[in-house]
Amino acid sequence: MFLFRWIRRTITVIVLIALIAPGYAVSQVWRAANNPIVRQGDVIVVLGTAQLNGRPGEALEARLKEAKRIFDLGYAPTIITVGAGAPGDRTTEAASGKYWLRTHGIPSKKITAIEEGRDTLTSTKAYAAVMKKRYVSDVIIVTDPYHCKRAMTMANDQGVVSTCSPVQDGPNTISASSYKYLLREAGAYLVHITVGRRGIQVSDHLPGADILTKVMP
């Protein structure tokens, strides 16, 4: 009888967690996207996304515009662009981002391009390492609204203090994004805080954005 009750209670707890956890993840991602808090930082980081032979794609250009906007407002004295290139690319997300910023009035000495990372975690580790070498700890992350929560969480896990300034135009604003983006990011965030923090790295750069099906070694 005792064993039966214990099994029943265990199953009940598992079911409750399975029901509550996705809702929690969705609420956290939605809240971060809709209530961004941006404060003064040591550096602005532009997370990379697609570029086409040195020309930023629409999503990356929207991030670069936002980085320039808050740089011009004096939120941070320097900008880091981060992101590697896809196989066969002649340049990288970081390099194309730096070039765009330079041609739009940001002094080259104020921009650092870190040409590493094809997923959020790898990119985060790369820029966090550079920040630690510079003895700075406060970062303003520029990315898509629904990406903010996971990007900030990963940054905090690397020992830096983060806020997020989401894009204000482009294809990935809240108004332009579909519910699928919210659910995808909620799933990615949930995976990170459960298995990701235990050393299992799950790539978010997969064909069709199927982030939950491939575990990286």
Image (cartoon, grey):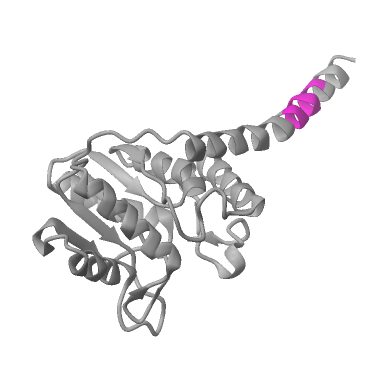
Q: Tell me which residue sits at (84%, 23%) in the image.
A: 8
Does 14 appear in magenta?
yes
- Residues drawn in magenta: 9-16
Frontmost residue, 29 versus 122: 29
Does 21 appear in magenta?
no
State left or right for residue 198 relative to residue 114: right
Residue 115, position as x, y percentages in the image:
27, 67
Residue 153, position as x, y percentages in the image:
42, 39
Q: Tell me which residue sits at (14%, 46%) in the image.
A: 77
Q: Main structural element of the magenta stretch: helix, strand or loop?
A: helix
The image quadrant of residue 13 is: top right
**Residue 145 at least partly seen:** yes
State left or right for residue 83 relative to residue 3: left
Does 63 appear above or below 193? below
Does 1 appear above or below 169? above
**Residue 128 at least partly seen:** no
